[in-house]
Each structure stands twice: as structure tokens, then as C-alpha cells.
Image (cartoon, rainbow, N blue to C red):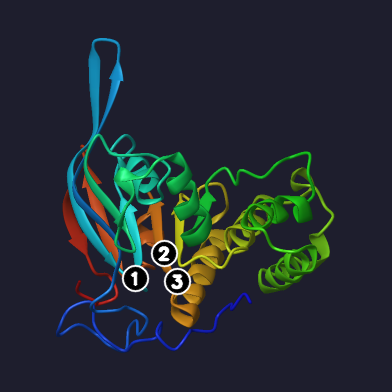
């Protein structure tokens, strides 16, 4: 059963990211459980005789229940890093762990299993199928998971209600506004009840008011359900709505900030 905005008993653990942090700020963060870890990760692209180094020795840890943003200029490697965190790609060297599993060692089938079972993706371009209805767009990930027709429809209807678009079930994406399309994309990302949401510039194609609403929805999801959320953004205002900001430049992490007073 899909459980939206309701924490399981082991998900709401009132602890700090580290001793002395703020328990009350984000009670879903788990002190001892890392959902995502990278160890000295590099990513290189080989274009004929040229080698492009996108990531250079990235090591980070994201605790279960954290709400994290990754910021950096264009070409800094932030989207490349998100692809590795989401098992969409493998590092050239180093290790990536998702719930303790070294995904850098998995084959394509193993990577697909991790993605389908644990991760929901939200993209700047929405990635909705233009010729299909909202219903069909949302249904596809659930088909891969093997849910019955009745269960698929139950989840779709519940999620559309949550994002306020219950009357759009049979509309096609091109008839919706940018904000509505992004809300559909978020609902689709939640269809399999993932533990992790990875969002690449989720507010990039919407106005500031809609962007603020989208980030508010992510925060509600994080606080009430304990979902680990990682957002790539270029917008400082968006980043300040998260618990931790990781700054990346030239493929390296060079700074972290805790805009809400939480230290990791």
C-alpha cells in the first residue's frame, strides 16, 4: 500500500545528522543510516583523443531522511553526479552505495532493479510522453513494478489528489501548464513509493511562485513521510529551502552550508 505523508515507525527518528545538531528541525534524519554514499568518485568522458573530467574525487554521505541540494555553475558536474547517485550511470572510478549496495558493481539489470525499487526521478524537462494521457504517463513505472490494474489506478488517483490535479487524468501533457506538468512528473516519481527522490532542476521551467510551491511539496514529503530528497539547482532561493547545500565546482565539492541550522 502506498503511504503518502505518513512515516513508518522506523522513518521518523528524532536525531541529529550529527551530535549537537537540531533534532526539531528535521526529525526524519537518521543519525546512523546512510541512504547514499560515494567514495572518491570520478567520471571521465572519452571523446577521441580528448578526455573530459566531469567529476574529480567526489566523496559524500547523505543520511536517510535528509533534504539536500546540489549547487554549482553550468558544467560543474552536478547533473553528472545526480545521474551516478540515481544509478543512471556508473563512475569511471570510485564507489557509489545506495542503501549499502555498491551500484558501481551492478550490471544493467541490477541497476534497473535499484532504480525501480528505490528511486523516483523528477527532471527539469518533465520527460512526459506527449502523445499519452496523464494516466498513461503515470501508469508506466507501476507497470514495470508489476502492480495490478486496480492497484495502479488506486495509486494514480491518490497521487493526483495529493498534487491537486484529479481532474486531469485523461488530459495530454501539451494541454497542461508548465507547473501542472511538473506536478504530474512529481506524482509519477512517487507512483512506486520510493525511498529516494532525485530532482534535476525541478523548478527550472516554472515561475517563481510555482517553483516555491514545488519545493514546499518536497519539504512536506520529506517531513511527513521521511523521503530522502536530493535536488540539483542553480537557484540559491531554492537551495535555501533544503537542509544542506553541497556546492560543486570543476567536478569537486568545495563547500557545504546548512541554511536551516542543521549541521551534518
Say above or below: 173 vs 197: above
**Circle 1 residues within 10 Å: few <14, some 14–19, many ≥20:** many
Which element carries disc 2, helix, strand or loop?
strand
Describe residue 189's horizontal placement relative to residue 87 as left or right: right
Identify the mark nearer the N-term, 3 or 1.
1
**Residue 224 position in % (x across, y down):** 49, 82
Real-space Cα separation, disc 2 to disc 1, in angstroms: 6 Å
For the point 84% across and 55% down, which residue is it? Answer: 170
Residue carrying label 1: 66
Note whether residue 202 is visible: no
Identify the mark nearer the N-term, 2 or 1.
1
Say above or below: 58 vs 238: above
For the point 40% across and 57% down, which residue is it? Answer: 231
Real-space Cα separation, disc 2 to disc 3, in angstroms: 6 Å
Real-space Cα separation, disc 3 to disc 1, in angstroms: 8 Å
Asked whether the beta carbons under mark 2 and mark 3 sit within 8 Å of each other, the answer is: yes
Which element carries disc 1, helix, strand or loop?
loop
**Residue 72 position in % (x across, y down):** 29, 46
Residue carrying label 2: 229
For the point 78% across and 39% down, which residue is it? Answer: 131
For the point 28% across and 50% down, which residue is it? Answer: 96
Q: Nearer the viewer, residue 50 or 258?
A: 50
The C terminus, quarter of image: bottom left
Note whether residue 103 is visible: yes
Asked whether the beta carbons under mark 2 and mark 1 sit within 8 Å of each other, the answer is: yes
**Residue 150 position in % (x across, y down):** 79, 68
**Circle 2 residues within 10 Å: few <14, some 14–19, many ≥20:** many
The N terminus, quarter of image: bottom right
Describe residue 199's horizontal placement relative to residue 37 as left or right: right
Residue 227: which disc? 3
Q: Nearer the viewer, residue 178 or 108?
A: 108
Amino acid at each position: 500500500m502506498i503511504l503518502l505523508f505518513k512515516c513508518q515507525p522506523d522513518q521518523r527518528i528524532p536525531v541529529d545528522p550529527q551530535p549537537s545538531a537540531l533534532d526539531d528541525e528535521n526529525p526524519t534524519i537518521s543519525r546512523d543510516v546512510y541512504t547514499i554514499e560515494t567514495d572518491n568518485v570520478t567520471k571521465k568522458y572519452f571523446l577521441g583523443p580528448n578526455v573530459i573530467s566531469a567529476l574529480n574525487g567526489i566523496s559524500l554521505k547523505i543520511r536517510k531522511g535528509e533534504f539536500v541540494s546540489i549547487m554549482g555553475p553550468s558544467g560543474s558536474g552536478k547533473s553528472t553526479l545526480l545521474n551516478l547517485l540515481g544509478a543512471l550511470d556508473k563512475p569511471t572510478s570510485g564507489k557509489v552505495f545506495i542503501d549499502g549496495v555498491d551500484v558501481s558493481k551492478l550490471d544493467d539489470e541490477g541497476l534497473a532493479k535499484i532504480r525501480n525499487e528505490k528511486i523516483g526521478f523528477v527532471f527539469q524537462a518533465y520527460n512526459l510522453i506527449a502523445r499519452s494521457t496523464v494516466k498513461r504517463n503515470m501508469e508506466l513505472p507501476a507497470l514495470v513494478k508489476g502492480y495490478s490494474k486496480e492497484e495502479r489506478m488506486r495509486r494514480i488517483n491518490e497521487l493526483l489528489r495529493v498534487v491537486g490535479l484529479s481532474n486531469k487524468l485523461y488530459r495530454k501533457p501539451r494541454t497542461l501548464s508548465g507547473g501542472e506538468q511538473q506536478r504530474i512528473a512529481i506524482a509519477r516519481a512517487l507512483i512506486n513509493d520510493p525511498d529516494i527522490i532525485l530532482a534535476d532542476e525541478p523548478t527550472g521551467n516554472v515561475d517563481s511562485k510555482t517553483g516555491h510551491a514545488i519545493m514546499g511539496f518536497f519539504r512536506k514529503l520529506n517531513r511527513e513521510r521521511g523521503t530522502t530528497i536530493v535536488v540539483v539547482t542553480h537557484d540559491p532561493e531554492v537551495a535555501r529551502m533544503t537542509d544542506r547545500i553541497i556546492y560543486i565546482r570543476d567536478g569537486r565539492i568545495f563547500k557545504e552550508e546548512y541554511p536551516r541550522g542543521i549541521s551534518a
